[in-house]
């Protein structure tokens, strides 16, 4: 069995026992072992700060963009192998594996393109030169400089390639070296992708480290110029945010956590209309793509009472038996497995909590923990029950909530305490404006699904590099991507004040 290594201090290094075993979630076959025990993480961070940081900061945006482009190509060159590893280690279908791998390389490429527009500079300018006093000679301008520490990226199990790539794209373009830590259970594809990056010979010394295995003492080694971008559960996010060393050093932390993403079908949408069909199509995709294991997958659907029965009937017809979960290595599989045995138990336990306030209306819950978890639709008995708005079931489950008015619909969405994405299906401008006012402050992304974009809509679940990803409250309060906005986390805004002629020469 393969022992996965970490890439630290510019070389591959194996950890010591005890090891964690990575398995195939469908067959249980042991695939690899991983351990970070015994690695000198303090030395790894010091090396990245001393060598990787200066190398990246010496590069212009255009040069950093070329690096991202090269890394995207390197990962793409290993695509076939990555597909097989993803299917084996994470239980996804081939099409879902492509979603992760191609999404990762597309994000790197998108940032490579953005880099060209940022030019031959090494830091960002923010706003214009402003006169600060009575004389025009005294002026000021904001600039955004890359921090001198390490960008520590801690990722969740569900996107082993995209998670690596989307964070890397922003940090490298901003000019910071990266230490990336994938979730241990699905690290096999990540390690292969990093091998492709390393073998490309493009990575400047110290610019990239991979920690395979648990975070160990990593957080005890951080210092004030480092940043931590975390994706995962709210519980772990809280542990990281409140870690004494992180707090004492005021280390910036970006958290992408749980989210009970909501969909509202507005009262103007009629059964059978184009907008209604768009809603159904996108809901089925959100429930079944990656078996509902996307942070942006729809968890709650709020709809007019009159649509409840038609929607239950339509979902029954479309989900069963088409999306019965199967081993993704079989032919014509539409939905694969949950990513790890532990997830099977977790999803069943959380579904049990939701069942205290909702009834199953499509499908049936399995009687025991399984990674081959079927799609299940529930209907809320008590639409305001907190368990339905607070417990994230990370699988192919969704709960329907009848609402008497759009005002009640907004109220129900807000009970989720902050979402990564909320979607409103409507063709009505007034309802769209109402939704923006009512939901804007409570969500990171607001998608209006309407007949006009039915052909082009990418749905709520797809995170696009040009649009911000992250949401308030329960969703963690973070912000990633969003074009140049995603670089902000890695930059220090400096208000530079001085003599105008000097500032003009400095900043062009
Ligand atoms: P998790 O258990 O919180 O683990 C996430 C990552 O944190 C893993 O790499 C894990 O490493 C690491 N970790 C665990 N304890 C740690 C500690 N004390 N210090 C530092 N790192 C630590 O979450 P998960 O089960 O992998 O992911 C599922 C959750 O992620 C879901 O709730 C989902 O909503 C959320 N998620 C959010 C987004 C988003 O963009 N907002 C995206 C995807 C997933 P090990 O694997 O080695 O334990």
Image: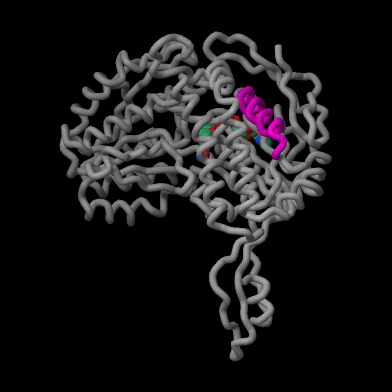
Q: Is residue 252 magenta?
A: no
Is residue 260 in view?
A: no
Question: Vertical placement of 23 versus 35: above or below?
Answer: above
Q: Position of residue 3 (x, y in %)?
A: 73, 18
The colour scheme used to paint the residues is: one colour
**Dominant secondary-structure state across the stretch colored magenta:** helix
Q: Name the residue at 36% across, 51% down.
A: 439
Q: Nearer the viewer, residue 486 or 106?
A: 106
Q: Nearer the viewer, residue 28 or 504?
A: 504
Which image quadrant shows ligand 1?
Answer: top right
Give the quadrant of residue 270: top left
Q: Quadrant of the C terminus?
A: bottom right
Is residue 202 in view?
A: yes
Question: Vertical placement of 291 versus 418: above or below?
Answer: above
What segment carries the magenta color? 187-202
Q: Position of residue 208 (x, y in %)?
A: 71, 39
With 92 as the anchor, is 211 left or right in this view?
A: right
Give the quadrant of residue 162: top right
Question: Vertical placement of 456 versus 324: above or below?
Answer: below
Q: Is residue 192 magenta?
A: yes
Q: Quadrant of the N terminus?
A: top right
Q: How many marks?
A: 0
Question: Vertical placement of 457 versus 183: above or below?
Answer: below
Q: Position of residue 317 (x, y in %)?
A: 24, 19
């Amino acid at each position: 069995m393969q022992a996965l290594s970490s890439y630290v201090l510019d070389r591959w290094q194996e950890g010591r026992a005890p090891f964690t075993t990575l398995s195939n979630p469908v067959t249980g076959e042991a695939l690899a072992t991983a351990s970070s025990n015994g690695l000198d993480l303090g030395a790894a961070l010091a090396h990245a700060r001393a060598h990787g940081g200066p190398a990246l900061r010496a590069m212009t945006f255009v040069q950093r963009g070329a690096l991202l482009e090269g890394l995207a190509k390197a990962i793409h060159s290993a695509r076939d192998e990555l597909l097989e590893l993803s299917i084996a280690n994470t239980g996804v279908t081939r099409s879902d594996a492509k979603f992760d791998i191609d999404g990762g390389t597309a994000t790197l490429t998108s940032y490579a393109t953005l880099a060209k527009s940022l030019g031959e500079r090494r830091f960002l300018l923010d706003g214009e030169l402003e006169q600060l006093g009575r004389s025009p000679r005294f002026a000021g301008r904001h600039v955004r400089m890359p921090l001198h520490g390490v960008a520590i990226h801690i990722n969740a199990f569900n996107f082993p390639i995209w998670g690596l790539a989307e964070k890397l794209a922003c940090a490298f373009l901003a000019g910071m070296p990266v230490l990336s830590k994938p979730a241990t259970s699905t690290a096999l594809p990540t390690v292969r992708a990093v091998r492709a990056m390393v073998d490309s010979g493009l990575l400047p010394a110290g610019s990239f480290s991979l920690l395979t295995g648990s975070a160990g003492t990593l957080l005890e080694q951080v210092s004030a110029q480092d940043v931590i971008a975390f994706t995962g559960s709210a519980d772990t996010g809280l542990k990281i945010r409140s870690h004494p060393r992180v707090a004492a050093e005021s280390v910036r932390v970006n958290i992408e956590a749980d989210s009970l993403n909501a969909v509202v079908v507005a009262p103007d949408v009629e059964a059978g209309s184009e907008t209604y069909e768009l809603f159904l199509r996108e809901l089925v995709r959100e429930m079944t793509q990656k078996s509902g294991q996307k942070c942006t997958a729809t968890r709650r659907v709020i709809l007019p009472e009159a649509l409840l029965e038609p929607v239950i009937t339509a979902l029954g017809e479309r989900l069963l038996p088409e999306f019965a979960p199967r081993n993704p290595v079989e032919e014509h599989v539409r939905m694969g497995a949950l990513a790890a045995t532990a997830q099977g138990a977790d999803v069943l336990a959380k579904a049990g909590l939701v069942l205290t306030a909702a009834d199953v209306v499509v499908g049936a819950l399995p009687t025991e923990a399984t990674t081959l978890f079927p799609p299940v639709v529930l209907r809320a008995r008590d639409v305001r029950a907190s368990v339905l708005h607070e417990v994230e079931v990370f699988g192919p489950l969704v709960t329907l909530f009848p609402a008497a008015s759009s005002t009640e619909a907004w109220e129900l969405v807000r009970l989720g305490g902050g979402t990564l994405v909320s979607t409103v299906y409507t063709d009505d401008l007034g309802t769209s404006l109402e939704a923006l006012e009512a939901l804007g402050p409570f969500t990171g992304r607001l998608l209006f699904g309407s007949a006009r974009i039915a052909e082009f809509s990418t749905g709520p679940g797809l995170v696009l590099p040009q649009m911000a990803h992250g949401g308030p409250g329960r969703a963690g309060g973070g912000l990633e991507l969003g074009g140049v906005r995603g670089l902000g986390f890695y930059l220090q805004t400096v208000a530079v004040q001085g003599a105008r002629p000097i500032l003009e020469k400095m900043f062009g």
